[in-house]
Amino acid sequence: MLDSIASIRDLDLDGQRVFIRVDFNVPLDADGRITDDTRIRAALPTIEHALSHGGRVILASHLGRPKGKRDPRLSLEPTGERLAALLPGGEVILTEHCVGDAPRKLAADLRDGQVLLLENLRFEPGEKANDVDFARQLAALCDVYVNDAFGVSHRAHASVSALPRLIAARGAGFLVESEVAALEHLRGQPARPYVAILGGAKVSDKLGVIDALLPRVDELLIGGAMANTFLAAQGIEVGRSLVESDKLALARTVMHKADAAGVKLLIPVDLRVGDALGATRADVVAADAVAPGAMALDIGPDTAARYRERILRAKSVFWNGPMGLFENPAFAAGTFAVAGAVADCPGFCVVGGGDSVAAIAQANLVDRFDHVSTGGGASLEYLEGHAMPGLEALRT
């Protein structure tokens, strides 16, 4: 909830240096080129609002995990270039460091229409440490603070937690507002039937959200490598498939909880298997017929059809995590089938998680959902009911 949090609409931006914490943590290929600019595009409404209302915009983000040290491979230069191409007539200046004399001078000298992009915040150890002294150096750059980085708002890092508490004029950007509104819709009283679809590699990564969803959803559809653990927990042999062997009892507990809550928990009835992660051919087998040397790498067509039937009946849908190794075209069909089903669902549909977002972008379906969350882990933590440091720091 955004009670007692100002909106960027409420802030006086004219002539002010406006620090906007964005989430430009975009995927890069081996040559450092951006492969998906969804997060940059998602920040445009807030950036353009600040510019059109006379703000001198200073953007800050992290990229990757440089562990407090400079890493040229994780420079924000590619994101600055992409942003400049997306902003009409925009000029984006990238600083060499995110704090220090040079950024202070550049921030003070900003002219109308210019945007200052600070170099990767995580090049400085003070960012992840939520260091107040580092936050004070950032605060010296600005007059107004706006958080538009929902994807890191679950982290107590300096630019999202310590910094806003040092700036009296602070508030939420449009992306944060839309993320909270969509997730709050699901966390409150969603229309039923409510179907949740969870994929990805590990059951352990989704335990918190499963516990949060079970009292709310009517059906829980499981895919991805985490489905292998549920199959193995039922005594089904899954060959060389990825299984969390130490979480089998936990998977059985989840199934018992679902049964007790009256929630239908569906796991794959067939699978696409290969002999390695890089396999170029997928064989379809029944879920209980995986050969000893095979790996389950995607849900099968019967499972996809079964899931589609339930998704199309839903009035509320939350999807997080791919159904298989969709990066490999041989094992992308299950994820794309679920993406198509959610896109065709007439209910209120939210997609969250970096891999799921990448999948719907590949399938050219981004515009077919009520909300596409850029949050990933943050969206899961919000649904779990955890306090979000980046939001709490905005409260007045």
Image (tube, rainbow, N blue to C red):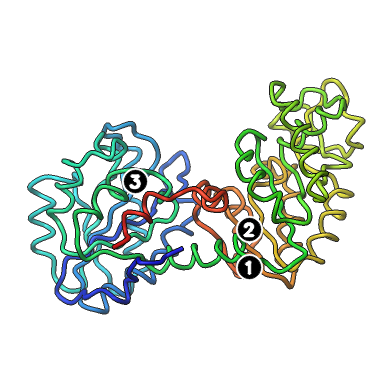
Q: Position of residue 154 (x, y in %)?
A: 43, 47
- CA–CA distance in space, label 2 to label 3: 24 Å
Q: Is residue 264 above or below residue 111?
A: above
Q: Position of residue 156 (x, y in %)?
A: 35, 43
State the image quarter where residue 313 is shown: bottom right
Q: Position of residue 364 (x, y in %)?
A: 63, 63
Horizontal arrangement in the rendering, residue 184 relative to residue 10 (left or right): right
- CA–CA distance in space, label 1 to label 2: 10 Å
Q: Give the labeled residue for mark 1.
A: 369
Disc 3 or 1, which lies upstream in sequence? Answer: 3
Q: Give the labeled residue for mark 2.
A: 360
Q: Position of residue 168 (x, y in %)?
A: 19, 62
Task: Tell me which residue sits at (75%, 26%) in the image.
Answer: 248
Asked if the residues shown at circle 1 and circle 2 are in contact, with their CB atoms under 8 angstroms apart, the answer is yes
Q: Is residue 142 above or below residue 315?
A: above
Label 3 CA crowd tier, 10 Å (few <14, some 14–19, many 20+): many
Q: Is residue 12 above or below residue 350?
A: below
For the residues carrying marks 2 and 3, which lies nearer the camera in this image?
A: 3
Farthest-out residue, front: 260
Q: Amino acid at mark 3?
A: His
Disc 2 or 3, which lies upstream in sequence? Answer: 3
Q: Amino acid at mark 2?
A: Ile
Residue nearest the viewer, comparing 91 with 49: 49
Residue nearest the viewer, comparing 180 with 340: 180
